[in-house]
Amino acid sequence: MFRTKRTGLVRRLWRSRAPVEGEGEADTRTHGSGGCCMGKSTKVAGKTSVGTEAELKALTHSILKKIKDKQLEGLLQAVESKGGARSPCLLLPSKVDTKLGQQSYSLPLLLYKVFRWSDLRHCSELKRLSCCESYGKSNPELVCCNPHHMSRLCELESPPPPYSRYPMDLLKPPDSLDSGPSSTETGGTTYSAPVGLSDSQALQESGDRSHWCVVAYWEEKTRVGRLYSVQEPSLDIFYDLPQGNGFCLGQLSSDNKSTLVQMVRTKIGYGIQLSREPDGVWVYNRSCYPIFIKSATLDNPDSRTLLVHKVFPGFSIKAFDFEKADSLQRPNDHEFTQQPRTGFTVQISFVKGWGQCYTRQFISSCPCWLEVIFNNR
């Protein structure tokens, strides 16, 4: 009975392995083939001589059969839910190497390749999520091998493609500031407030200075719901998450009848994870579709343009750097003297991009998007 249960778990895990290049789903759900963040392309080797399918199956089965049943159940929960369900760490020896064909892989790397990213070449391409027990630990004897406690690291290309950049002239505030996101249409950061309050008043009157950011959800030019204040180190923002705990966009009441908005809303799915970490604020794309991010701290401080970054499913990007944002507030900088919160705001669009390479020039034309306003006090 003991062996039967373990064998069944191993078989289910093998059936849930990540698709390899050429099997369709791998292109959009498991890796960012074609480049992440409009940056360096992810070079996929394809079906190289790293061992046949039979060799990979035999090696994977032999490894999994040495793992305890409870650990296999946790791994299966993570893999079958594609990271949607909370799953425990899979702590295994970090020093064990495995051989597949002519290449050697560490045990964690092999499991990440089999169950998440078939094109993964090295663990340096990954970032551990802050929810993981192994987060922040260097060279532990046991390391978490749960593939859904990891994300692909988004690399930025320098210089970025010019067609996705914003001229700084577009960021200058208009002569008059009416209600609604008129300056957001021009790439600026003036916000439509909850009834009776401006955003700055809402921040000041929240009565709790422990929050490190607030989040506003927009559908095109209309804000939906109120500001969401964030005190915890990380926040899940999602439409539909099996074990979601955070900012659920699906529970917000929206009057928008646009077919496109309704379609994009359902594609938000598992959404994103926003986490404040020692080196800055990271955004992890948990959904099945790309997200698009604009942040002043992602660009060169001397640049006169801002870049919209495309982040593929399963990838993470450091979207905000508090120290860099402080240095951006220069007294001779027109943008930051006129709109002092510009450097402390990140804009994120789900599914649909904006900018000069898209039909939508401004984020306020995107169906579903977020404004993350950081507390600089």
Image: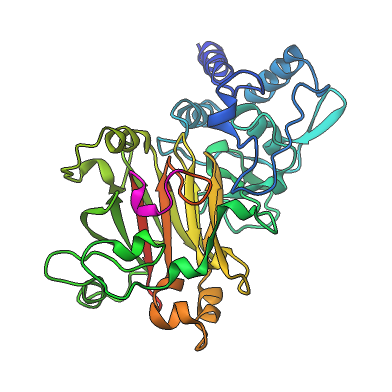
| Location of residue 189 by image quarter | bottom left
On screen, 69 above or below 255?
A: above
Residue 182 appears left or right of 159: left
At x 19%, y 37%, the residue is: 257
**Residue 271 magenta:** no
Q: Main secondary structure of the magenta part?
A: loop
Q: Given the current orientation, which residue lies at the most extreme bottom position? A: 331
| Res 41 → quadrant | top right
x and y percentages locating residue 71 in the rendered image: 53, 31
Residue at the left extreme of this rendering: 196
Q: Where residue 363 sits in the image (x, y, percent)?
A: 39, 53
Q: Nearer the viewer, residue 180 or 201?
A: 180
Against 179, is 349 above or below? Answer: above
Q: Which residue occupies 19% across, 76% down?
A: 205
| Figure colour scheme | rainbow
Nearer-the-camera pick, 283 or 103 = 283
Asked which quadrant contains residue 25, the reply is: top right
Q: Is residue 81 left or right of residue 56?
A: left
Q: How many marks?
A: 0
Q: Which residue appears farthest toward the right when viewing the image?
A: 102
Q: Nearer the viewer, residue 154 or 142?
A: 154
Q: How far from the left and from the top, in percent, is residue 49?
A: 83, 21
Name the spot of residue 216 as percent of width and height, x first.
Answer: 29, 58
Relative to 45, is 166 on the left or the right?
A: left
Determine if residue 279 is in view. no
Is residue 365 in view from this perspective? yes
Q: Nearer the viewer, residue 30 or 5?
A: 30
Q: Residue at x 41, y 39 (%)?
A: 86
Q: Quadrant of the C terminus?
A: bottom left
186 left or right of 262? right
Is residue 361 rendered magenta in the image? yes
| Magenta-tinted stretch | 359-367
